[in-house]
Image (cartoon, rainbow, N blue to C red):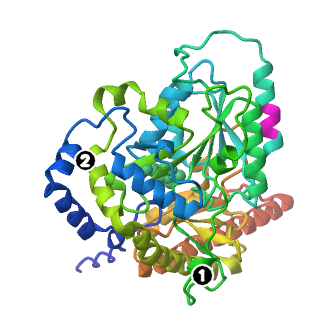
Amino acid sequence: MGSLPAPEAKKPINLLWGKPSPSLIPTDQMAVAAQKVFSNPTIAIAGMQYGDSPHAGYEPLRQRLSAYLCGFYGCPSDPSHLCITGGASQGLTVILQMLSDPIATKAVWMTAPCFFAARKVFEDGGLTGKLRGVNEFDDGSIDLKYLEREMAKLENQPKTNTACKPTAITQKSYTHLIYIVPTFSNPSGKTMPLACREALVSLARAHNALVISDDIYDMLQWPSTGNEFTSPISLSSISPIPRLIDIDHALPNHPSDPYGFRHTLSNGSFSKIVAPGVRTGWVDAAPALVRALAGCGATLAGGCPSQLVATMLAELMDHGWLEKHVRETLVPAYQRRRALMVEAVNRQLEGLGGGVAVINDGGPVGGYFVWVKLPERVKATDVARVAKEQEALVVSPGPLFGVAWDEQEMDLEGFLRLSFSYEDESNLTEGAMRLGNVVKNLLDTSDQMDSDSVNSRHLDSTGFGGKSDL
Ligand SMILES: Cc1ncc(COP(=O)(O)O)c(C=O)c1O
């Protein structure tokens, strides 16, 4: 008797990756931009040299980026507010080098759930053991009462040591760092309302805190109409909520901040609007803070990061190509993908007591992720394990996004994060279907275990429980 043919392996589907679909990466346009750079010796040499001092980055890119941000956010266009970085993650390392201190900085407050990869950057910055979660509420605001109370507690502790980094007028050590992704957060997709942003800025000003606002999904937004799958967006209806820096900069300098570093910065990136491999981003902040970042030792020694790519991005931004790419290619594609995923996940899970947690009907939606509430009795870590083993489906379980298990942190076992940015549309629907199967099976198993335990309790009460021959 011949052996049975092996069951056909399922094609892998990855709903964990927060990267763009290959179909949305503008390789042709980048090739044209590179060609333009190398056909102009002045630009080519600028890109192939150490950049000019002060090392805030390739000037034409700062100028075009500044005009773009001004058009998008309605803020003043001023390149002195911009420092080019090697992307938001590399930018964060420089922020920590120049604006925090392993001793003088008492805590890093992170929205819980948080973007998990940021945790390691803070730990590498000498802040291990100082990460604290601040719960995010359903409306995207965070628990400011808790934050204020706990910040004050730390400030009231007796001083033990002095700072280990030099204090100079070009550098500063904030007492607290507050890391947030206020718009289309990773992982929850929530957006912090204006009132919470304003309150957070005043809290930061009062407590010598720096809010590191990771704004990398801001440009990928569209108004939720409930049926964006069929109706294209009206671009005129997009008006972004003010960033935290826009709120901060509209206020006078705080008396405790004589050099004008301010208390917020916006960490931006080309990763989600061009491609992650360009490894280029920016920090938008007060000029004093920009000078601090540009004065980082590695930058002084080696120039601004991503100098050559910066010349290509400047070409790409010429004549408004990037705005058009975001508006006409990326936003419609992500809008459609998100609508498809929301619809498919809800079709699978709503009848079971789960579904997409953040819909924000009528408000802006965007980014790369949807946050899914699981039915009670099903744990995210079980779903992720079984999905991988049985359905070749990779999803991110809620606990991956915990900050640290302290009193404040919510239980994240009831949630999953699903990315709609990478897989093609048919895989998004197929992935949701496989997820539905996994959840149904886990619920069936749980029902079965409940009924077995009722039976065994019944048997126990009849005196036969536990006998191996029954
Ligand atoms: C919230 C957030 N910040 C930062 C990053 C990484 O940005 P970059 O590629 O610019 O380092 C990501 C990538 O997924 C992200 O989701």
Q: Could you tell me which quadrant the N terminus lies in?
A: bottom left
Residue 204 appears left or right of 338: right
Q: Which residue is mark 1?
A: 343
| Count of picture labels | 2
> Which secondary structure lies at badge 2?
helix
Quadrant in which residue 100 is drawn: top right
Question: In the picture shown, does residue 333 fall above or below 68?
Answer: below
Q: In this rendering, does residue 407 appear at all? A: no
Which label sits in the foreground, 2 or 1? 2
**Nearest the eye: 204 or 111:** 204
Q: Main secondary structure of the magenta part?
A: helix
Residue hosting label 2: 308
Residue lying at 43% horizontally and 55% vertically, measured from the top left: 65
Q: Residue at x 34, y 37 (%)?
A: 304
Indicate the amino acid at tag 2. Answer: Leu
How crowded pointer 1 is (Cα within 10 Å; few <14, some 14-19, many 20+) is rated as some
Asked if residue 148 is among those painted magenta in the image, a careful observer would answer yes
Residue visible at 42% across and 63% down in the picture: 273
- Which percent across, then down, holds residue 363? 69, 72
Q: Is mark 1 within 8 Å of ligand 1?
A: no
Mark before the other along the chain sequence, 2 or 1: 2
